[in-house]
Image: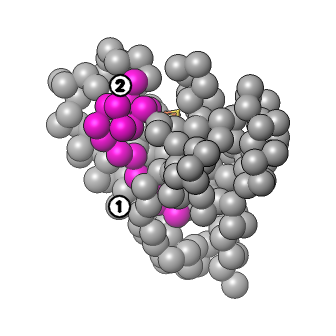
Amino acid sequence: MVNWLNDSGPLSLAAALIQVHALYDGLDAEIDFHKPRCVASGRCCNFEEYGHRLYATRLELEYFRHAELAAPADGPAADANAADGTGALFPLPLYAEDGQVVPGCPWQVAGLCTARRGRPLGCRIYFCDPTSTPWQNNAYERYHRLLKILHDRAGLPYAYMEWRAGLATLLEGPAQENK
Ligand code: SF4
């Protein structure tokens, strides 16, 4: 899965994103093995109500851009988004009328995640099943460490951002390629 670990040379951003994809595949297989239960049915994506926050690394946000923003979103508020001046093709607006980020994730539509391909490590790994906490914590640390190494290899400054703050950075344009 992580054949790049044996190599210390630089990676292009595109190559790093392919490795993020492989890393997520490995993680998904690991999660399948543990078979955690989801009992809150997406309530954890409503961060304020649920009482927690989601964070993602800069490279994951770039992966999200490629996986989810390449084609126009077709969710119910796509037109409203295009009209709100942000240029964001998110299924629901990122900003509320008062200019603050919305409560919850703008990719959860009618209780369902519409960003299954691109969702970051924190979304993939989090299950409210209390019996899953020990392996979740361990896996999060391991995969997060690999993501940090990938930042270095791609020459991408490491950043770890609250999810909606990170989504806002996607509006500023793609990360610069490693030369
Ligand atoms: S990306 Fe999907 S799983 Fe992650 S917080 Fe948003 S709606 Fe939930």
Query: Where on the picture, by quarter, is residue 45?
Result: top left
Query: x and y percent of residue 115 in the render?
Result: 61, 35
77 left or right of 83 in image: left
Q: Nearer the viewer, residue 157 or 143?
A: 157
Q: Is residue 176 magenta?
A: no
Amino acid beneath label 1: Arg
Let me know if residue 24 appears in the view. no
Question: Where does the image place residue 32, in percent across and percent down from the top left?
Answer: 40, 24
Amino acid type shown at disc 2: Phe
Q: Is residue 44 visible?
A: yes
Q: Is residue 2 left or right of residue 131?
A: right
> Looking at the image, which is closer to me, 55 or 91?
91
Q: Residue at x 60, y 63 (%)?
A: 169
Q: Nearer the viewer, residue 41 or 119?
A: 41
Name the residue at 42% across, 63% down: 160
Residue 13 x %, y %: 66, 68
Mark 1: give few (<14), some (14-19) or many (20+) Cα within 10 Å: few
Name the disc covering residue 33, or none: 2
Q: How many residues crowd around disc 2 within 10 Å: few (fewer than 14), some, or many (20 or more)?
A: few
Secondary structure state at the residue bearing disc 2:
helix
Specify start and end residues of the magenta stretch as a single range: 43-58
Instruction: Where is residue 31? Give x, y as percent.
Output: 38, 30
| Quarter of the rendering containing residue 109 | top right
Checking the image for residue 51, the label placed there is: none
Residue of label 1: 145
Q: Could you tell me how far apart the alpha carbons at marks 1 and 2 are, in whole angstroms?
A: 21 Å
